[in-house]
């Protein structure tokens, strides 16, 4: 059975989300389809609200920018302040957003609207953040050992807090001492892990990082962290070489203290 021992000097456990605490399919199978399926209704319901107007304004500017750069995309041409044909205006925004999502664009305009839709969905209970069953009991245990627990994910800190604040197991935010996103740097760069240690106020060697991605594990190791690679259903398979190189676990329950600690 896979198992990992926390080095004796460890004081912090740092957790990735997707593929680690949460099924890697959560974003692809729950969050993104939610946007596609509820976009039109959301826009209709919130069209007159300032926040929604700002989101639409940003999307419109993005579409204009895309057109200038000759990207083939539907353009939201109707001024949203003219309410002569609201339905048509909404349909154009819907088309523009669906096109951006299909093209896997990462524009600020798209992310902002998605963020607002997900926030509303979490608040209303339409979406609940998924966490594997072994996650909460393990974190409680680590905290009892005196460990601090932090999150480091490419999802924004706001998105992380929604996922854990409105999870299938209720509000879990009390389990964490803090959150990091890519504002601290990319997850495949060792500098990011040095910065995280600095922000937490400990040595890199005191942190154990759990992730499903070996490139992230490698970067963390280079910065001095200890790592374990998490194998979950649907995660990218490790190569023979990677399996030999890294400590792997299939459940957080396999993390144990070293007997001398
Ligand atoms: Mg991951």
Image (cartoon, helix red, strand yellow):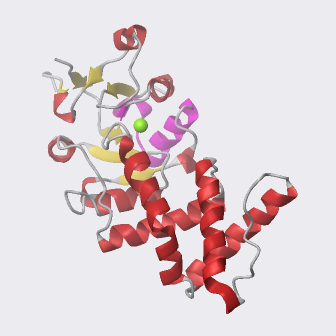
Vertical relation: 16 (above or below) 47 = above
Identify the residue at horizontal 57%, vertical 88% (top origin). 48
Q: Is residue 202 magenta?
A: yes
Identify the residue at horizontal 50%, vertical 68% (top origin). 39
Magenta stretch, overall SS: helix
Identify the residue at horizontal 29%, vertical 46% (top origin). 148
Depth check: give the residue in front, 86 or 254: 86
- Picture coordinates of residue 88 (x, y %)? 65, 78
Q: Report the number of numbered marks.
A: 0
Q: Is residue 54 visible?
A: no
Q: Quadrant of ligand 1?
A: top left
Vertical relation: 151 (above or below) 57 = above
Instruction: Give the quadrant of residue 60.
Output: bottom right
Q: Which part of the image, by quadrant, shows the C terminus? A: top left
Query: In the image, which residues are magenta?
Result: 189-211
Q: Is residue 227 magenta?
A: no
- Describe residue 166's horizontal placement relative to residue 56 as left or right: left
Q: Which part of the image, by quadrant, shows the N terminus? A: top left
């Amino acid at each position: 059975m896979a198992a990992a021992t926390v080095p004796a000097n460890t004081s912090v456990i740092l957790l990735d989300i997707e593929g680690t605490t949460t099924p890697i399919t959560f974003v692809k199978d729950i969050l993104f389809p939610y946007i596609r399926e509820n976009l039109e209704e959301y826009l209709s319901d919130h069209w007159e609200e300032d926040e929604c107007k700002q989101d639409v304004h940003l999307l419109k500017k993005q579409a204009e920018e895309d057109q200038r750069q000759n990207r083939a995309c539907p353009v939201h041409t109707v001024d949203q302040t003219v309410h002569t044909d609201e339905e048509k205006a909404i349909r154009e925004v819907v088309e523009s957003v669906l096109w951006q999502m299909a093209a896997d664009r990462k524009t600020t305009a798209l992310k902002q609207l998605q963020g607002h839709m997900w926030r509303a969905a979490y608040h209303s209970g339409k979406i609940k953040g998924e966490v594997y069953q072994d996650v909460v009991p393990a974190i409680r245990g680590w905290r009892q050992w005196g460990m601090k627990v932090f999150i480091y994910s490419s999802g924004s800190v706001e998105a992380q807090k929604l996922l854990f604040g409105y999870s299938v197991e209720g509000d879990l935010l009390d389990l964490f001492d803090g959150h990091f996103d890519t504002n601290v740097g990319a997850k495949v760069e060792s500098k990011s892990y040095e910065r995280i240690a600095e922000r937490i106020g400990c040595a890199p060697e005191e942190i154990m990082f759990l992730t499903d991605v070996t490139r992230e594990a490698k970067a963390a190791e280079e910065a001095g962290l200890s790592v374990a690679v998490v194998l979950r259903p649907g995660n990218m398979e490790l190569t023979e070489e990677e399996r030999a190189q890294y400590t792997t676990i299939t459940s957080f329950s396999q993390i144990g203290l070293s007997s001398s600690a």
